[in-house]
Image (cartoon, rainbow, N blue to C red):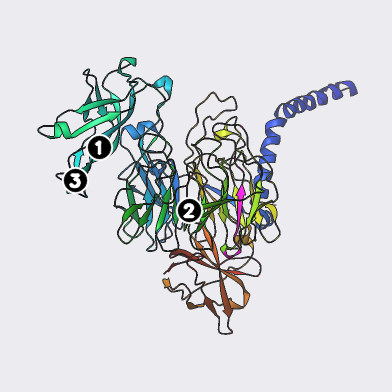
Amino acid sequence: MKRLTSATLRHRVLLPVIGVSVLLSANVPPLYGFTSGWLHERELNSVEYQREHGYWQVLELPEDQRVNAIHAALLPTGKVLLIAGSGNDREQFDAGTFKTLLFDPATERTELVPTPEDLFCSGHSFLADGNLLVAGGTQRYEVLEPDIERAGGTMLVKNESPDGGPRGFVKGTEFVAPDGRRYSAGHDFVVPPATKTDEPGDRVVVTASETEVWVDAAGFGDEYVVERQTQYRVNGLVGDEVQDIYGLAEAITMDKQDYQGLDAAFEFNPWTERYERVADMHVKRWYPTLTTLPDGQVLTVAGLDGSGQILDGTQHEIYDPQTRSWTLRPDLERYFPTYPSLFQTATPDLLFYTGSNAGYGPDDQGRDPGLWDLSDNTFTEVDGLRDTDQLETSMSAWAGPVQDQRIMVVGGGGVGESALSSDRIDLIDLTSENPRFTAGPDLPAGTRYPNLVQLPDDTVLITNGSSDYRGRGLSDNHTARIYHPDSDTLTVAADPRVGRNYHSAALLLPDGRVLTVGSDPLFRDAKNSISGEFEQRLELYSPPYLFGGVRPVLAGVPDRVERGGSVTVISPHADRIDRVRLIRPGAATHMLNNEQRSVAVDFTATTLGRLELDLPEEATILPSGPYLLFAVDADGVPSVGVPVMVR
């Protein structure tokens, strides 16, 4: 046998060692990545981490049950209504494909609901009976100037005859210019009869009616442009109608054509799970705000009209749920950008406009926050808000129980496609003699499109958003914070796994979790070269209080309670209860959710395992409608929210 020398032995040992070393060094980055990722997941799933920061869970629905969730509302049944309409997808709009999805967070079951109109970019508000009023939406998608092939404009259709009833016309109705050029109506429309007024001296004055309709040229190019006011014949009319009904347009151009609003309105019935048509609004609206008033009626403001023009503030209207009809209120003249954040204060007839909005409108009008008194249409501006040039895409919410009358304004960005974003959290106490904003703690980064959710323990979850317009440059923040009103501080929440920016929303669920949906980025790469895709995954956040111990239990809660009345409920943990809250379910879209409010309820715990509740009597604090009743113990752990209707 050949004897191995020490040199040979060293050589043979060294080669395998070198080989293993090379192999390890080549694989260190992926091995390190795998190891660090595994350790990170292990930390996220640890009880200690979840008790301090909470936990996020991503949920992917079956492919045939996914929608572009533009709007989200928690129904009194505990299901979530996700309204897409056309979902900001022109192909779906052109095909007349409009979607609404019902999602049950308790079972994760879904169901698509027939959707009668394109409710994309509508407004919504809960009514006293629990129905969700949904008003407005999209009549037509925008066309940018380079893409315009046909001239278009607003045609004012006039009727000079007071005889007969309203005259209906269908989409495609032709208007003919004196020189023979033809233009077609972009949608169905109705022309009322003229009005007839008796004047002194047996005189009768007839005033022609007017209806606006968008028209497109029958042919392509500049030859269909009309630069001066022109009268048009309505094709197909006979007899006296030929003279009585006609079109009048100031100009028909090749200019940019904005999104156009709908006048359609519906109540979504949570129990039949179907839309119910109600009277149309007087004004077409895209990006409107609906605000529930103490008497149960709903104030509707702002939006783009049926020609894509921003409403000038003279056409607000109010919905009456009793008659399911609308009344114009020209006395309430106040200009707002689209989707303005309006909150009913503790004072009757007094609304607070935070300045938050979702765009559309000049940068020097309607941007200042203030108190709007509906009784005399006065508006008192308030000072102290930081970054006032970055209120677009900010979000506002009550901070703590509504009785405290504290509102927070969070994040935001510059007007339009600005890259500016704010890390601001500013607060205002409306009970002050001279209310003004004061600075709160700042977010870790500038944040457009934040989602704010009031939680049962009086804190506010602030999640998602991006530092640039619609997430440009992969700028989604992937962060979350919890704001504590009692200490004016932020604590770190677990990072959401899904980035969300424009067209995202978040809701509190009955079990105390938070659902986040949507996101509509422009791009999906850092170089902004690959078009974005709408985020259809859902994500559920379990706040730290869900890992804090045994949850209190409520039983014997009546389905309906009276405002100002007393209620007895059963709780085996009555001696642990620190606070009781009625939380109005959210109805969110475009960083707007003025429905959500947490109402503090006075209570007495008895030795018999009961809670004696005394409900607030002010409709400005506790408007009629659906709520979730939560009991929260001294450790901040809430019960499951029990649905109740307040009358």
Q: Position of residue 382 (x, y in %)?
A: 61, 51
Separation (CA) of disc 3 from disc 1: 32 Å
Q: Nearer the viewer, residue 357 or 334?
A: 334
Specify which label sits upstream in the sequence, 3 or 1: 1
Badge 2 element? loop
In this rendering, the label closer to the viewer, 3 or 1: 3
Residue range (magenta)? 403-419
- The image quadrant of residue 17 is top right
User: In this image, 583 relative to 229: left or right?
Assistant: right
User: Which residue was labeled with disc 2?
Assistant: 377
Does the magenta run of residues contain 407? yes
Q: Position of residue 466 (x, y in %)?
A: 60, 38
User: In this image, 428 relative to 208: left or right?
Assistant: right
Q: Looking at numbered disc 1 in the image, what kind of residue is underneath it?
A: Asp
Separation (CA) of disc 2 from disc 1: 35 Å
Does the magenta run of residues contain 217? no
